[in-house]
Image (tube, grey):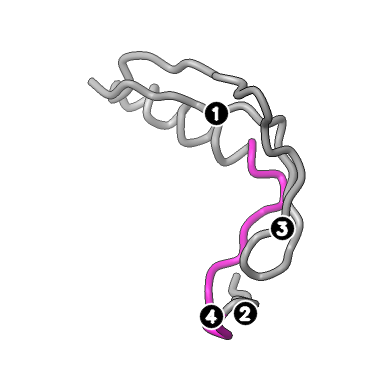
Amino acid sequence: MFAKNQRNGSVTHKIDPAVDGERDNIGSSLQTASKAKTLTYYLPPNPVQDARNATGDGYHSDGRLLVIVLQ
């Protein structure tokens, strides 16, 4: 899907507002392919949990970052 970038009017990709699923999918895919040595979730002190992207669409997260050490 495509969307209009509110900042400069260009065309960009549209993201799923539930971004955690894609984060976890990337980690799982790397692990399945034996490319990830370790996966660690980190919750920063002031996590971003609800925000808007460049197209003005809202997204939400549990705020955790996935740190992946590659093989």
Neighbourhood count class around disc 2 (C-alpha, 10 Å): few under 14, some 14–19, many 20 upward = some
Kind of element beneath mark 3: strand
Query: Label 3: how many residues lie within 10 Å, few (<14), some (14-19) or many (20+)?
Result: few
For label 1, the SS is strand
Q: In the rendered structure, which amino acid carries the disc numbered 3?
A: Arg
> Which residue does the numbered mark 1 point to in the structure image?
65
Which of 34 and 67 lies nearest the eye of the viewer?
A: 67
**In the rendered view, does 30 fall on the left or right side of 21?**
left
How far apart in space, not on screen, are marks 1 and 2 (Cα)? Answer: 27 Å
Residue that numbered label 2 is attached to: 4
Q: Position of residue 3 (x, y in %)?
A: 63, 75
Q: Is residue 9 left or right of residue 69?
A: right
The percent position of residue 46, horizontal first and vertical second, equals 68, 29
If you read the primary sequence from the N terminus, does the residue marked by circle 3 or circle 4 appear first?
A: 4
Q: Which residues are magenta?
A: 8-20
Eye-nearest disc, 3 or 2: 3
Residue 67 vs 9, above or below: the answer is: above
Q: Quadrant of residue 6?
A: bottom right
